[in-house]
Amino acid sequence: METLKFFLPATDYVAVLPQIVLVATALLVLVMGIFKKLVSGSAVGYTALAGSGLALASVLLFGRHAAPTSSFSGMVLVDGFSFFLTLVICIIIVLTVLVSLNYGRFFEEIKSGEYYSLVLLAGVGMIFMATAGNLILLFVALETMSIAIYALTGFHKEQLKSGEAALKYFLMGAFGSAFLLYGFAFIYGATGSLDIIKIADFIKSHPQILHVKFLVAGLVMMTAGIGFKISMVPFHMWTPDTYEGAPTSITGYMATGVKAAAFAALIRVILVPLAPMQHSWVDIMWVAAFLTMTVGNIIALVQDNVKRMLAYSSIAHAGYILLGFVAGTGLAQAGMLYYLMVYAFMNIGAFAVVALLSRKGEECSSISDFAGLGFKYPALGLVMSIFLFSLAGLPPTGGFMGKFYLFTQALRSGYVWLVVAAGVNSVVSIYYYLRVVVVMYFQPQPAENPIALTAVSPGIVIALFAATTAVLLMGIFPAYFMSLAGNSIFSLM
């Protein structure tokens, strides 16, 4: 009598070690949150911090020199690209938890196990989006990230604006996911595979398929689906309301982690397997990059709320990053990764300052709330100015070098007018960034509602120091970070 034998696929658990650590920590803090009488909210937060720090350490220890390979039957790809994006996302998770530890002093619901569990699980989805080698895993990762972020956006349960933001994000995100899934279906119909590497090999060996309408339709729908996540015009409508209504600690998380994961998917799914179709999408992406940076900057000029201003600013920065996508060269794509890293530090840093100005049960995100900050709290005013200068692209910050790399590569690829438009947009953005600096240093504090930092934890001090140091280091010594980004993108190609 024959016995049944089961053969498990070859697996490499080290390839998913950061995800394993984050999931285990998320389950642990969720259980800890149940026993509120025995475990304090701070203990839950510090446990989440320890787990996210351990995940970051595992990336640095095991991912830096890992040979390019795949695991779980090609579902997970291990290469320099996945290492770089996993590193960036783990840094974002650690910084978000540090900011949340302080933010929880103003809002009791932030101290819950559910909050930190959702933050960590969203991070798991982000990492899998960066490492996915199969379209099915990419979609599951996207939904894992999105569902957690939807819940986190509406975490201020007592605030109508927070619930409205979560609902808008959910509805628009559902449309984006549907577009993406339909795009995957069309790609499968044209190539007969969901494996990204096999799709690329099939297109190379069957060049006649480039004119098949199924493939073109899949490309368009995938671009639209990912465009929702990166806030690309015209798929940006949800961004300002969602950023304003969400808890400030989560706004910074969305603006950086979600964008990094979405751009990772854009590069992994479109630039690699569909590179022979560049002639089909380059003109569309040219227009999208121009509209995205222009619309974001123009509307940001008239905003009086810092969170809404930074929301439209994030739309504009998505347009700058798309310059690397349009240019199409390896160095341009390395510039995209470099910019994503520096953008993570300067944007989380800016939102951390906004979160620090909160009061018990109340956020202070109006530009007028920053009046006199530079004189009453010089260190805080200085770091906020550095983040704003970097967002504006002024030297010697990392934001300047990021734009320099992207603009230079787009210029070398012949997109002169797009670079001119990007330069004009950068000059326009200086106005609304410096507007906040002017308010901090040249407007007196209002007598009836002066600035008062009622709660400053060591965690947020560490987060601000780390973000400020990284922004300056990436601006003064950019070569190391650019080489790291370059090596990661060339391993992908």
Image (cartoon, grey):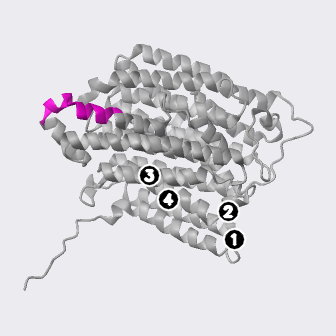
Dominant SS in magenta: helix
Image mark count = 4
Q: CA distance from mark 1 to mark 2?
A: 8 Å
Q: Residue furthest right?
A: 447
> Which residues are drawn in magenta?
206-220
Task: Please state which of the two labelled residues, at mark 1 or mark 4, is closer to the viewer.
Answer: 4
Q: Amino acid at mark 4?
A: Leu
Which mark is first along the chain, 4 or 3? 4
Residue at the (34%, 60%) spot, across then down: 15
First reached walking from the N terminus: tag 2 or tag 3: 2
| Residue 162: % across, % down | 66, 47
Image quadrant where residue 273 sits: top left
Circle 2 residue: 111
Residue lying farthest bottom?
A: 1
State the image coordinates of residue 452 (x, y, percent, origin top left): 84, 46
Where residue 344 appears, x then y in whole percent?
54, 42
